[in-house]
Image: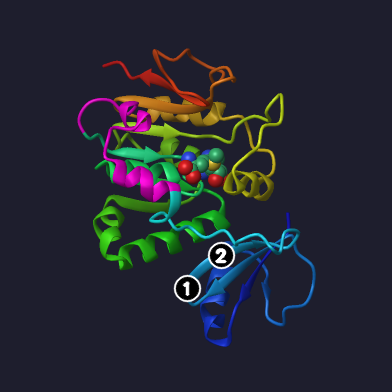
Amino acid sequence: MEVVVVAQQEDCLPLARSIAGETGLPLWENGAGEADYLLMVTPQGLEVQCRLAPREKPLQLAWLQGTLAYRCKQGGKEQLARAMGKGQPLILDATAGLGQDAFVLACQGYSVTMMERNPLLAALLRDGLQRLAQQAEGQSLALRLKLQAGDSVDYMLANGGGHEVVYLDPMYPQQPRKAAQKKEMRHLRSLLGEEDGGERLLLAALGYANRRVVVKRPSWAPPLPGPSPALTLPGSSTRFDIYLIQG
Ligand SMILES: C[S@@+](CC[C@H](N)C(=O)[O-])C[C@H]1O[C@@H](n2cnc3c(N)ncnc32)[C@H](O)[C@@H]1O
């Protein structure tokens, strides 16, 4: 997928240049050419626009809106939070993506370090976090979320466990029967292409986490290859496989 950085207006150009430098994505200064996705730098933050679907609302990380905001206000313990175990362990979200799960965990009081290796998504997450911190109701949540751009497998292999729980949500395998996917996940899949299956993530996480590793899986898919999970929390479309660390 070809992605280019575009400044929506003149005064966004310096930021667009620095994002192009950080992400390694080309910058369009004159608006000409072809690309599948545009990473638009606007005064309201970063947006991803799909050029094949120009009428679709651009993708922006707005955690305090829509379903996520609703889930945040619900208060009851989410299955995702239950999977993290007792207390409020420090969590490394080693596959941060659009930060939705990390945000839900922050709403439930957890401190989460988000790691994301894709530079475009890392840029979106950084922007989403900055905007969250600027909103009155987002400030305390933003304090619980940290972002680290980079490959979490490399990080976990090189560092001792500073986190009690590692959370993994590797891209799902292609569904046997193609079910409707949420817009965000559809774009994520097309931006990232086919990913490795998550086995390396699981092995690195098992060597790094102090207490447990939690893996989100579609309910129809088998566990990740490797050791079997000790526990499973089922849900309607997804489940959480839990691996306990001994000692
Ligand atoms: C399915 S998405 C995660 C969605 C996320 N849980 C959410 O709530 O938005 C998987 C993400 O993991 C990232 N990823 C996969 N392997 C990674 C690795 N080794 N290090 C860091 N990020 C990784 C991919 O780039 C992708 O953005």
**SS at badge 2:** strand
Quarter of the picture containing the C terminus is: top left
Task: Identify residue type, mark 2.
Answer: Glu
Task: Answer whether residue 143 is magenta in the image.
Answer: no
Task: Identify residue type, mark 1.
Answer: Gln
Q: Which residues are magenta?
A: 67-87
Q: Cβ–Cβ below 8 Å for labels 2 and 1?
A: yes
**Location of mark 2 (residue):** 47
For this orientation, the residue located farthest to the bottom is 10
The x, y position of residue 169, in whole percent, is 50, 34
Quarter of the picture containing the N terminus is: bottom right
**Location of mark 1 (residue):** 44
Residue closest to the eye, 209 or 9: 9
Q: Quadrant of residue 71?
A: top left
Image-based side of 156 in relation to 163, left or right: right
Q: Residue at x 61, y 48 (%)?
A: 183
The x, y position of residue 152, in whole percent, is 47, 41
Residue 164 vertical placement versus 221 (above, below):
below
Label 1 within 8 A of ligand 1 by Cβ = no
Residue count near mark 1 (Cα–Cα under 10 Å), binned few <14, some 14–19, many ≥20: few
Label 2 within 8 A of ligand 1 by Cβ = no
Residue 17 vertical placement versus 38 (above, below):
below
Residue 146 in sight here: yes
Q: Residue at x 56, y 65 (%)?
A: 47
Q: Residue at x 71, y 64 (%)?
A: 54
| Whole-number angstrom distance, CA of label 2 to CA of label 1 | 9 Å
Residue closest to the eye, 207 or 8: 8
